[in-house]
Image (spheres, coloured by chain):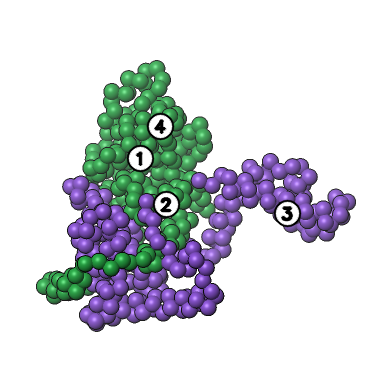
């Protein structure tokens, strides 16, 4: 498994807030820097901009390759192929759709995948281009559509657990979430204190959260 | 409204797919599922962004690599070849080719387009037809067409069986599967998939070992493994 050293943001040693803030700005700046460099390579075939990209990414690509191949020669072959592709495909990079490092990462992943296939001397076989779309999938028609989809998915997952709630909790939950009544209305209908309505909801939500966590893969 | 996809790969599987760690054939089933499933498209994108973040943040040790030499060598290569920048390739789905089986025409997801252009001959057995995709790997990758009202004899799996519904609907003891649904059966799972009288079904099937048929005369099918493998 790929087990990468996480960045300072997730380091074991706590950082002060000031450090984190500075780190964030620095990261944003570098993101922008790589996007601009790629654009220069694409439009002007700018070698200086390319050298900047190379100097930053090549050592990272080598480390990435070493993890998979465990051998220097192949790792460096992967670095070279990846960086050559960065030059060739720079025009395909679209900054509105993702950041430069993600784009370079996916190129490296694809080069590595195809190298492993070639090593096993596969002919007319599945290639990285079959597997990973070059670019991004179109956005779902509207936010609403995807939100609705998420709600449907969640409802389907929740339904069986909902039915297993203790009757008193389920009753309150049905009134609040399915019949969309206010807590006060439910309190009046069931002739129970408002505080009891609220605590039954909290207990039920806790149970559901636990149930969902438990079924995760 | 299109039927929402209900059977998805686990997040762990999607992560391994995004890292490029799965075998090509298993990856192909996932890629085709993702083509059909907006939810998993988003999830894969998020996973990839996260992996790329780790890739950038990894600690880099100094080593003896002569980076300048490599940079010059790459730049030299870019000059040798005419190196026209690659124009935006057509990735849209307008020009998708379709396949024909039993007088039915089906459109395939992007991931299967190139391979399906050179699929093997359709082999027919009862209401079932199968054609292999040209993948020389440990698993067996094929298209599986099941006519209306047809039952695939009950079988068990000696290995992993992945079935992606590409079109139509199939049902088994555990539920109903529509276009985009991905079923993963492990060894020991036994099931009897069938189509309903009003709808046929086209699937992508990835098998790591032959199916083994369980009941009566269908056991005679076991020697015909190449048909279901």
Find numbered disc 4 in the image and state the secondary structure of the residue it sits on: loop
Disc number for residue A202: 3
Residue placed furthest toward the right? A191
Q: Do dots 2 and 4 share one subunit?
A: yes
| Mark 4 belongs to chain | B
What is the distance, in whole Å, between disc 2 and disc 3 at their CAs?
33 Å
Q: Which residue is mark 4?
A: B187
* Residue at horizontal 22 percent and vertical 58 percent from the top: A72
| Mark 2 belongs to chain | B
**A126 with respect to A185 (left or right):** left
* Residue at horizontal 58 percent and vertical 48 percent from the top: A213
What is the distance, in whole Å, between disc 1 and disc 3 at their CAs?
45 Å
Mark 4, Cα crowd under 10 Å, few <14 / some 14-19 / many 20+, is some
What's the colour of chain A in the image? purple
Mark 3, Cα crowd under 10 Å, few <14 / some 14-19 / many 20+, is some
Q: Count the marks: how many?
A: 4
Q: Do dots 2 and 1 share one subunit?
A: yes
Residue A194 quadrant: bottom right
């Amino acid at each position: 498994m790929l087990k990468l050293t996480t960045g300072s943001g997730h380091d074991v040693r706590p950082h002060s807030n000031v450090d984190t803030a500075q780190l964030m700005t620095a990261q944003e700046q570098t993101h922008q820097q790589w996007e601009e460099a790629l654009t220069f390579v694409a439009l002007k075939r700018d070698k200086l901009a390319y050298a900047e990209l190379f100097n930053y990414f090549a050592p990272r690509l080598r480390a990435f390759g070493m993890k998979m191949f465990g051998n220097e020669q192949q790792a460096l072959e992967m670095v070279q192929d990846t960086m050559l592709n960065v030059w060739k495909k720079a025009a395909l990079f679209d900054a509105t759709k993702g950041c430069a490092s993600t784009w370079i990462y996916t190129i490296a992943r694809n080069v590595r995948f195809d190298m492993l296939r070639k090593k096993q001397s596969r002919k007319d076989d599945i290639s990285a281009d079959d597997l990973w779309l070059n670019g991004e999938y179109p956005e779902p028609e509207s936010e609403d559509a995807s939100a609705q989809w998420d709600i449907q998915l969640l409802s389907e997952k929740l339904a069986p657990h909902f039915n297993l709630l203790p009757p008193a909790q389920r009753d309150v939950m049905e009134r609040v979430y399915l019949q969309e009544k206010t807590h006060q209305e439910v309190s009046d209908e069931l002739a129970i204190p408002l505080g009891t309505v609220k605590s039954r909801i909290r207990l039920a939500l806790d149970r559901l959260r636990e149930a969902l966590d438990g079924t995760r893969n | 409204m299109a039927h929402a996809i209900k059977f998805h790969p686990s997040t762990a599987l999607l992560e391994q797919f995004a890292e490029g760690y799965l075998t090509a054939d298993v990856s192909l089933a996932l890629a085709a599922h993702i083509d059909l499933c907006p939810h998993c498209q988003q999830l894969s994108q998020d996973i990839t962004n996260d992996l790329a973040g780790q890739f950038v943040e990894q600690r880099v040790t100094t080593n003896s690599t002569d980076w300048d030499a490599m940079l010059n060598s790459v730049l030299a290569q870019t000059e040798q070849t005419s190196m026209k920048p690659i124009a935006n390739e057509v990735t849209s789905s307008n020009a998708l080719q379709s396949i024909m089986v039993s007088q039915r025409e089906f459109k395939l997801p992007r991931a299967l387009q190139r391979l399906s252009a050179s699929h093997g001959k359709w082999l027919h057995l009862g209401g079932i037809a199968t054609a292999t995709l040209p993948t020389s790997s440990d698993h067996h990758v094929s298209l599986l067409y099941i006519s209306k009202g047809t039952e695939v004899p009950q079988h068990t799996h000696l290995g992993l069986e992945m079935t992606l519904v590409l079109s139509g609907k199939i049902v088994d003891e555990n539920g109903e599967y529509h276009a985009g649904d991905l079923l993963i059966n492990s060894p020991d799972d036994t099931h009897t998939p069938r189509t309903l009288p009003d709808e046929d079904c086209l699937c992508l099937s990835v098998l790591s070992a032959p199916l083994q048929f369980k009941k009566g005369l269908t056991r005679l099918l076991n020697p015909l493994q190449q048909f279901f493998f």
